[in-house]
Image (spheres, rainbow, N blue to C red):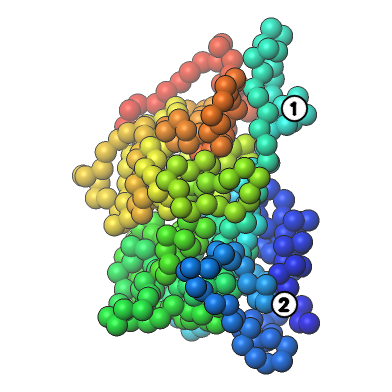
Amino acid sequence: MPDSIYTRRKFLLSALTGAGALYTTAATQALAQNGSKPASMNEHGKKAHSMRMDPLVDQFPRTDPKMRFSRPPETMGKQMGSVLTPGLPPLGYERDGNVKVFRLIAQPVERTLTRGLSRAQMQKELIIPKGYEQFRPRTSQPKSMLAWGFNGVCPGPTLEATEGDRVRIIYRNELPEPSSIHWHGFELPFYQDGATGYFPFEARRPTLPGEEAVYEFDLIQSGTLMYHTGFNVMKQEGLGVGGLFVVHPRQKERPVDRDFAILLQQWTFHPGNPNPNVTVMEPSFATFNGLTSPTFPMLQVNQGERVRIRFGNLSLMYHPIHLHGHVFELVGTTGGPIPPGARWKDVTVTIGPGESRDIEFRAWNPGTWRLHCHVLHHIMNQMPNMPMGIAPPEGMFTHLHVKPSDPSYDPRSPEAPWIYPRKAERI
């Protein structure tokens, strides 16, 4: 068997043994060479995807046992742009003349949403002073899910390009049913949109399991855009088939020192079941880039740096994301940059389903500041219908750590002098 092909059993076993908390083993193992046999063909050269999809008897297959899974492309893990997507590896591109070529492989993926918080971890990571012992936080359990994603991760990696670029995305479908990619928010030719189906007015049909499709178009806009399935959307997007696509403007208004991207998603599970339930409207897990606190990493910046945070929402609900300690400026939507005269300042930005929002600020105020959704149920996992006690931070919750420019300065000290710049210098 070629090294570049996994069986389903080996894929899941390798993911279980080597995934770690951030992404599956498929994204971390050595990347294989091309030239292997198409996953749609078995060892006898016959079609391997012969599953019948009868809605009266369909058992909702999460993976085709006959399918073989490719390793991630060689560009997976290569940071070729400026955007950091915490908790997810970057995706680089190849060059074909003036065309930037990206590769996306839709696959079943195991994703660790949270490592949980055990009693031993509390003793190691928390400080519980004397007299507070009876008020210690409750423990929380680790949680993994069997989802659908791209290149071995869920959500998919962030793509980056520049306004004016021509891009080509080579898409391979290793899901157990037809799928496609819709380029969410893009102005592009109708044929390239990827919102596929069986109506006669639709330009193309979805990609069958084991087969490939190519999308190619010019980028004539800039902004924080998204990509997600364009077929059987409720099910497939609900299982995680999506990601962010950042298109930088040809001429930048002003440079930023740190550029972060965060995709908002939500999931529901029955007890003991790792398979997301996409049929309910009350999610039990809310994630940043497929992770909850305490597993989602802290955003690290230096005092004085200009910071941009991009949020995209592929969940069913609105999320008011609140930042402590700073006032930011809303500088972009899914439609692109907001003209300077139309921007506004705030401390909470609400992102609706299918929307993106970009915020910018000067990280002038040292400390470790909370960044979280202000819907209270979205900062805890499972939303237990029981006495909660002291609930640890979970869900859409992290911190922005602003490292002081003076190494001796301790923002936790009540004696530390607080020096603040003029209002115009704080944005």
Most distant residue in the top direction: 131
Q: Which residue is mark 1?
A: 119
Tell me the quarter of the picture where residue 156 sits.
bottom right
Lower position in the chain sequence, tag 2 or tag 1: 2
Question: Residue 41 in the image: x percent, y percent?
Answer: 65, 87
Which class describes the residues within 10 Å of circle 2: few (<14), some (14-19), or many (20+)?
some
Say whether residue 318 is left or right of residue 418: left
Q: Amino acid at mark 2?
A: Ser
Quadrant of the rendering where the N terminus is positioned = bottom right
- What amino acid is labelled 1 in the image? Arg
In the rendered view, tell whether residue 5 sits above or below residue 318.
Answer: below
Residue lying furthest front: 56
Seen from the viewer's position, the closer of residues 207 and 340 is 207
Residue 102 in view (yes/no): no
Element under label 2? loop
State which mark lies toward you, 2 or 1: 1
Q: Residue at x 75, y 24 (%)?
A: 123
Return the mark for residue 4.
Answer: 2
Q: Quadrant of residue 46?
A: bottom right
Label 1, secondary structure: give it. helix
Q: In the image, residue 300 lies at what x, y percent?
A: 57, 40
Residue 338 versus residue 87: which sits nearer the camera?
87
Residue pushed farthest left?
A: 341
Q: Position of residue 173 (x, y in %)?
A: 55, 75
Q: Is 103 rendered above or below residue 211?
A: above
Residue at the spot 73% in from the left edge and 88% down from the top edge: 43
Q: What residue do we see at 60% from left, 50% from top?
A: 87
Residue 26 horizontal side relative to residue 315, left or right? right
